[in-house]
Image: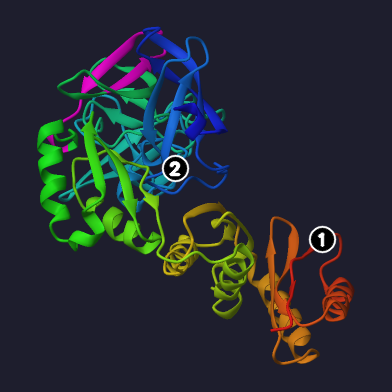
C-alpha cells in the first residue's frame, strides 16, 4: 500500500489501533502536496504509525490542516484560553450554549467585561478576571465543544469536553465494525471515544455498495462496463478502466454525490483509444494555460512523461485549480494527472497595480502574437506564457529585472515555441 503513497507530506499524533495509544504517524500522499495554506478536500491519505507501521486510509477533509468550508468553522473561544475579540463565538463554562461577543469594555476600576448575544433577544454581560484573557494560546482558532460538535470536529482540532470540564485534542476517527467514533485525548492523557450522531455515520458496506450500483446506472454502459467497486468502513474502493480522464471525472463526480461516505480510494486506470507523443500532449497542456490564464492562477509548471501529466499550480483562489483541472481532463490521451496545488497569498492592491502595469508594458513592447503574463507569489516574480524566440525570452527577462520590485527573484518560465 505504501508504494501507492510515496510522499510523506506531514505528520500527526494519532490514535493507533494496534498500539492502543497516541503515536506519531506519517501522513503520506500520492503527490508531493504542501499543507501550507491547507489541502483541498477528498484527497486520500495513508496514515502510518511510526512505532508499529500499522496503517489506515483517511481523507484530507477529515484533518484540521485541510481547507475548510464556511459551514465547518464554528470554533468557540473560551475565556482564560483565548484572546477575545468582538464577533468571536465564545463559551462561558456552565452556560447551555455559546454566543457571539458584541462588546468588550472596562470600567473605571479596570474591570473587564464582555457582552454576549445568544440569539432570540437573549444577551448577557460577563465580568472577566485578570486571568481570563490568554496571551499564550494553545488553540488560536478556538475549541470544538464536545459532545455537541463531535460530528464537525476534525482530526487535530482542539476540543473542550463540556460535561467533563476538560480540554483535549482530536486524535482520530475510528470504525469499530458498526459505528464511526471520534477519538480524543484529554490533557490528563485519558483517551475517549465519542460515537458520532446518525447524521455523521457512514453507510453500512452493503448499503453503500447498493447505492453505488444504483448511481452508476445513470452513466452509459460503455463507461461503467469495466468498473469494479467495493465498500469498507465508509470508504469506496474503485478500480477497473475507463477511456479518458473526462470519463473518470464523470464517474467520480457522480459517486461523490453520495452522502454518508468518507471518500473514494480511486485506482481507475485510463486506457485511451489513441496514443499521442509526450511532446504533443505537453504542448497542448501548455496552451491550455497560455490561452486561458485564470486571474486567480499565480504560476504553473508542466511536464508530461509516458502520457502522465504533472502540473504544479500556485493559486490565489481554488477556482483556478478547479478550472484548469476540468480543462486538462478534457484533453484526450492523458492517462494520469498529477496535480500539485499550492495556495499562495494574494498580493496587496499596490503590488497588484505595479505588476499589472509591468505586464502591460512588457506586452506593448513585444510581438502581439506572444502570450506573456506577470504574477507575484511567494516573494518571487513569475514570467509566464510563450514567445517565439530565445532572444525574446532573454529581452523580456532583462526588462522585468529592470522594472520589477527590488530584492525579488525572477522565475522566467516563458516557453519558446515557433508555432
* Number of marks present in the image shown: 2
Which range of residues does the magenta coloring cover? 182-199
Position of 352 with respect to 258 (left or right) is: right
Q: Residue at x 45, y 33 (%)?
A: 111
Query: Where 88 falls versus 64 (above or below)?
Result: below
Magenta segment includes 175 = no
Mark 2 crowd level (few <14, some 14–19, many ≥20, 10 Å Cα): many
Q: Which mark is residue 66?
A: 2
Q: Quadrant of the N terminus?
A: top left
Q: Is residue 128 above or below residue 402?
A: above
Residue 355 point in image, percent of width and height: 71, 75
Q: Quadrant of the C terminus?
A: bottom right
Q: Is residue 103 left or right of residue 202?
A: right
Horizontal and vertical percent for residue 193?
A: 26, 17
* Residue, disc 1: 408
346 or 215, which lies in front? 215
| Above or below 232: residue 123 | below
The residues tagged by marks 1 and 2 sit, at their Cα atoms, a distance apart of 30 Å
Q: Residue at x 45, y 65 (%)?
A: 319
Is residue 110 visible in the rendered image? The answer is no
Question: Which residue occupies the foreground of this view, 286 or 26?
Answer: 286
Q: Toward which corner of the image does residue 326 lie, by quadrant? A: bottom left
The quadrant where residue 262 appears: top left
- The residue located at (19%, 28%) in the rendering is 196
Dot 1 or dot 2: first in sequence order is 2
Amino acid at each position: 500500500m505504501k508504494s501507492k503513497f510515496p510522499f510523506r507530506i506531514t505528520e500527526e499524533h494519532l490514535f493507533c489501533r494496534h498500539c492502543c495509544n497516541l503515536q506519531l504517524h506519517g501522513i503520506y500522499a500520492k503527490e508531493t502536496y504542501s499543507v501550507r495554506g491547507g489541502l483541498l478536500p477528498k484527497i486520500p491519505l495513508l496514515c502510518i504509525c511510526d512505532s508499529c507501521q500499522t496503517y489506515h486510509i483517511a481523507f484530507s477533509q477529515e484533518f484540521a490542516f485541510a481547507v475548510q468550508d464556511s459551514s465547518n468553522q464554528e470554533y468557540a473561544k473560551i475565556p482564560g484560553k483565548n484572546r477575545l475579540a468582538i464577533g468571536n463565538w465564545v463559551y462561558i463554562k456552565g452556560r447551555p450554549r455559546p454566543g457571539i461577543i458584541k462588546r468588550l469594555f472596562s470600567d473605571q476600576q479596570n474591570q473587564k467585561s464582555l457582552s454576549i448575544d445568544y440569539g432570540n433577544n437573549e444577551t448577557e454581560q460577563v465580568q472577566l478576571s485578570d486571568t481570563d484573557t490568554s496571551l499564550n494560546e494553545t488553540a488560536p482558532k478556538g475549541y470544538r465543544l464536545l459532545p455537541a460538535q463531535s460530528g464537525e470536529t476534525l482530526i487535530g482540532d482542539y476540543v473542550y469536553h463540556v460535561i467533563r470540564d476538560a480540554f483535549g485534542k482530536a486524535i482520530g476517527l475510528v470504525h469499530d465494525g458498526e459505528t464511526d467514533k471520534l477519538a480524543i485525548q484529554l490533557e490528563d492523557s485519558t483517551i475517549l471515544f465519542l460515537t458520532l450522531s446518525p447524521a455523521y455515520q457512514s453507510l453500512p458496506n452493503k448499503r453503500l455498495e447498493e447505492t453505488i450500483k444504483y448511481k452508476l446506472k445513470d452513466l452509459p454502459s460503455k463507461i461503467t462496463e469495466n468498473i469494479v467497486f467495493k465498500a469498507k468502513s465508509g470508504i469506496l474502493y474503485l478500480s477497473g478502466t475507463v477511456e479518458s480522464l473526462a470519463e473518470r471525472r464523470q464517474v467520480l463526480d457522480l459517486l461523490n454525490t453520495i452522502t454518508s461516505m468518507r471518500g473514494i480510494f480511486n485506482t481507475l486506470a485510463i486506457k485511451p483509444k489513441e496514443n499521442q507523443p509526450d511532446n504533443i500532449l505537453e504542448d497542448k497542456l501548455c496552451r491550455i494555460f497560455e490561452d486561458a490564464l485564470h486571474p486567480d492562477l499565480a504560476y504553473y509548471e508542466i511536464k508530461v512523461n509516458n502520457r502522465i501529466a504533472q502540473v504544479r499550480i500556485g493559486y490565489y483562489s481554488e477556482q483556478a485549480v478547479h478550472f484548469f483541472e476540468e480543462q486538462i481532463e478534457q484533453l484526450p490521451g492523458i492517462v494520469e494527472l498529477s496535480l500539485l496545488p499550492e495556495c499562495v497569498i494574494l498580493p496587496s492592491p499596490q503590488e497588484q497595480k505595479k505588476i499589472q502595469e509591468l505586464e502591460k508594458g512588457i506586452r506593448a513592447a513585444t510581438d502581439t502574437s506572444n502570450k506573456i503574463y506577470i504574477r507575484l507569489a511567494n516573494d518571487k516574480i513569475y514570467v509566464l506564457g510563450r514567445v517565439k524566440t530565445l532572444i525574446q525570452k532573454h529581452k523580456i527577462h532583462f526588462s522585468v529585472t529592470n522594472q520589477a520590485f527590488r530584492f525579488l527573484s525572477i522565475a522566467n518560465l516563458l516557453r519558446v515555441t515557433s508555432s
